[in-house]
Amino acid sequence: MGVGIRVTNLNAWYGDNHTLQDINLHMPANNATALIGPSGCGKSTFVRCLNRMHETNPIARATGSVMMGDLDIYKDASPVEVRRRVGMVFQRPNPFPTMSIYDNVASGLRLNGFRNRRVLDEVVERSLRSAALWDEVKDDLKRKSGASISGGQQQRLCIARALAVDPEVLLMDEPASALDPVSTSKIEDLIFQLKSQYTIVIVTHNMQQAARVAENTGFFLNGKMIEFAATHKIFTNPTDKRTEDYITGRFG
Amino acid sequence: MRDSIKTGRVRSAWRWSANHVFTLLAVGSTVLVLAPLVAIFIYLLYKGASSLNWAFFTQIPKPVGESGGGMANAIVGSGIILAIASAIGIPIGIAGGVYLSEYGRGRMLANAVRFTADVLNGVPSIVMGISVYALIVLKAKHFSGYSGGVALGIMMIPTVIRTTEEMLLTVPSAIREAALGLGVPAWRAVVSVSLKTASPGIITGCMLAFARVAGETAPLLFTAFGNAFWSTNPNQPMAALPLQIYVYAISPYDDWHRLAWAGALVLIAMIMVSVSLVRYVASRGILKGAS
């Protein structure tokens, strides 16, 4: 089951560059939240703060609080613990090239020391089914490398890999931007189904995509969150002039 | 109109010849690079193959004046010394390379290590022999196989450290982040994902280092020293192929010269076999379509 995410006064820096300024928002459990905004506005930095991936860069830091359910991920948990509860799917598919399809999906559990074969088999099948990839790869599970399937399949493999560790939250940083329209619509269908079990945060440049999959949408500009509201409201009746300018294509 | 067609033809003729000239240059250079290697091997076969026989691989050297004998002790000695050298040079080198690429980026210590490795790479091998002589042999008061292994092991470190670093740097950061994003501890991500992805290149680097020190003579002169008898105890002076070749080659006896050629042939063959074997074994684990 997903958990709600409450972000309070989140600030983030890369060196002297203040990339996120006083972000406050609440993302309800088992919803999809879309983040839109022009390139460099801080959307990616924001999602990277939600699984503490931001701080893997030595010059980066962040302040403020991020509550996932009852857990303050910056106070009560180590980055490793946080990332076990928060799955992440990146912009470009990044399966482990030296591992088979099976090993890719099993990697999250295996690399954390989990060895029970029967359970692994079950988890791999369940995750690949959830990611709508099982039927396409079930005959090649251990024979093919994760890097040998098509780009769209690779991205669904990465989703399966993230789901296999049974996270509560799934972060997706432009998951379909490197994919063709058919693969994109598969990923969108998937997000729609996954919402029932996970809280999803999706960064996207594609506003139709945001409108299709997300209950709520946040608009970022220059490191600030300009507006956060129900998706239909953002797209039909935005409060802020800048949001309106952006979604009507007047800038960005 | 006609003019432009004409210049078009001239141009394409020029392109055709330029293309072929450069192809020829590239092929020519490749042949030039391969020629010495092939020439050496053929010459070794010509000079050494006739002296290779069963006795060469099973017997130890005969005393001066008697003909026959072999280099069994030197072959085994080289194997032991190289095993010790690899056991020292490869783990330290890989660990150092991991530090340089994964933990030490931009740090003073990393720059110092990188600089030291490059200098160490340029230290003449005889100096390495003398240093190990002073540090180990003098303290132990006797020559020993393990001191030769230490000298060669230290010589392996710079190559292994630098190739490990270079190869790890070619692993895309997206792959690293994928591992970290799954809640994998950083050390585990390095070992199971970064190192594994970079392993073909790292293995090549280790083999390069191995092949380089396998033929070293100078560092062994003051350390392993050589031994005319069976010596499998690393704490005793130990025979090694390069040493044996050296001693036989500068001797005044024709029979020993022939054995020296045979020894050189065996040394090169040993290096080629071990490198190919490691590559074969390493390539078997790689899946279809893995880059």
Image (cartoon, helix red, strand yellow):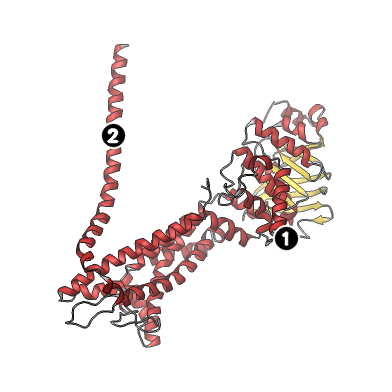
Q: Tell me the residue that label 2 is attached to.
A: B20
Q: Quadrant of residue A196?
A: top right
Q: Is residue A4 visible?
A: yes
For this rendering, which residue is in front, A219 or B226? B226
**Quadrant of the drawing holding the C terminus of chain A:** top right
Would you place residue A34 above or below residue B173 in this image?
A: above
Amino acid identity at mark 2: His
**Residue lying furthest top:** B1
Above or below, A231 relative to B131: above
Question: Which residue occupies 39% across, 58% down?
Answer: B276
Residue A42 in sight here: no
Q: Which mark is residue A78?
A: 1
2 and 1 marks on the same chain: no
- Residue in front for this viewpoint, A42 or B96: B96
Q: Residue A36: x and y, percent? A: 72, 36
| Residue located 77% across and 45% down the image | A23
Residue density around tag 2, few if under 14, some if 14–19, many if 20 or more, within 10 Å: few
The residue positioned 29% from the left and 32% from the top of the image is B18
Residue B52: image x %, image y %? Answer: 25, 68
Residue lying furthest bottom: B141
Which numbered circle lies on residue B222? Answer: none
Could you give the CA–CA distance between mark 2 and mark 1, rounded to whole angstroms? 61 Å
Number of numbered discs on residues: 2
Q: Decide if residue B253 is on the left or right side of residue B149.
A: left
Q: Nearer the viewer, residue B24 or B112?
A: B24
Instruction: Please identify, in this view, whether the residue under mark 2 or under mark 1 is nearer the observer.
Output: 2
Q: Is residue A143 left or right of residue A46?
A: left
Indicate the position of residue B195 as horizontal and vertical percent values.
Answer: 54, 58
Disc 2 on helix, strand or loop? helix
